[in-house]
Image (cartoon, rainbow, N blue to C red):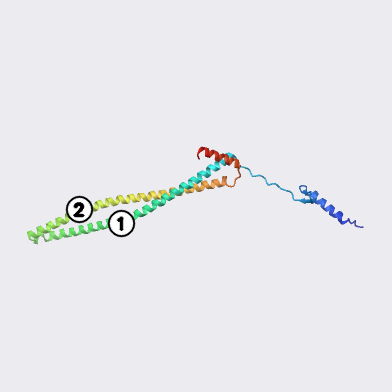
Amino acid sequence: MKRILLPLALVIAFSAQAQVTNNTKAKVDPKNNKVANPVVEKPKAKLMSRDELRACMDQQDANSKEAAAIKEEQASYKANAEKIKAEKAGVEAGETALAKQVGEVRAEKEAILAAHAALTAEAPKLEKAEFKARSEAYQTRTNAFNASFEAVKVADAEQAARRKAFGDKIDALEAQFKAIEDRTEKHFDSNDKWKAECQNKAYDENDEKAIRKEKAAAGK
């Protein structure tokens, strides 16, 4: 059987016609009669409503104000920590001074007790004048000890009050730190919520202008 061979020009014509027929969405450039690729329009992003945009803007403003407030609170905490650090040295110096006073009073007490025991043991052998002199010296020393003991009691009470006040400040500083920590965590959560609900969301610029105008009128 003989094969029928089509002229080359006719084959090309059929091929071009087939391409045009298969690509129903193709566009033909009238100038050069070439087939162009179809233009596919991207779907338009859904815009936020004005109420949604307003809520997002309000949340963003609130987050910014909260960030500034947290920063101020952190500065306050740092200042309080520095004050307590300086006060700690004074409290520790007071503890050292009190310990020295207590040690001296205890040593004097032991010495007085020893002197009393010696005077009692030696009294029968002493001359009346010597016994009187030693007794008076003992009494003078005892009176001085009593005054020192009272001074130590006062110093101990003052140091106890200073110690308690310092401890209260430490507790307050720790509470302030915990409050800042909790507040910061909530702030991060609020930022994450804003990012999820508002960030990169399309909106109408006219809505934004209108909302900012509202805020300006309200003094916000």
As helix, strand or loop, the secondary structure at mark 1 comes to helix
Where residue 6 is drawn, which disc sits there? none
Position of residue 93 in the picture relative to residue 61 (left or right): left
Q: Are marks 2 and 1 in contact (CB under 8 Å)?
A: no
Residue at left offset 28%, top offset 50%: 158
The quadrant in which residue 115 appears is bottom left
Horizontal arrangement in the rendering, residue 6 relative to residue 150 (left or right): right
Q: How many marks?
A: 2
* Crowdedness near tag 2: few (<14), some (14–19) or many (≥20) residues, C-alpha within 10 Å: few
Q: Residue at x 53, y 45 (%)?
A: 60
Disc 2 or 1, which lies upstream in sequence?
1
The kind of secondary structure element at disc 2 is: helix
Residue type, numbered disc 2: Ala
| Residue farthest along the right direction in this orientation | 1
- In percent of width and height, residue 87 lies at 34, 53
From the image, tell me which residue sits under label 1.
93
- The residue wearing badge 2 is 147
Residue found at x 52% / y 47%: 191
**217 vs 162, nearest the viewer:** 217
Q: Nearer the viewer, residue 146 or 42?
A: 42
How far apart are labels 2 and 1 at the CA level?
A: 23 Å
Q: Residues within 10 Å of mark 1 (few under 14, many from 20)?
A: few
Residue 166 spot, x, y in % from top left: 34, 51
Which circle, 2 or 1, is nearer the viewer?
A: 1
Of the residues shown, which amino acid type is indicated by label 1? Answer: Ala
Where is residue 33 drawn, in percent x and y? 80, 50
**Residue 20 position within the rendered picture, expressed as x and y whole percent measured from the top left:** 80, 50
The quarter in which the N terminus is drawn is bottom right
Task: Give the residue at the far left of this rendering.
Answer: 128
> Does residue 48 appear anywhere in the picture?
no
Residue 108 visible in image? yes
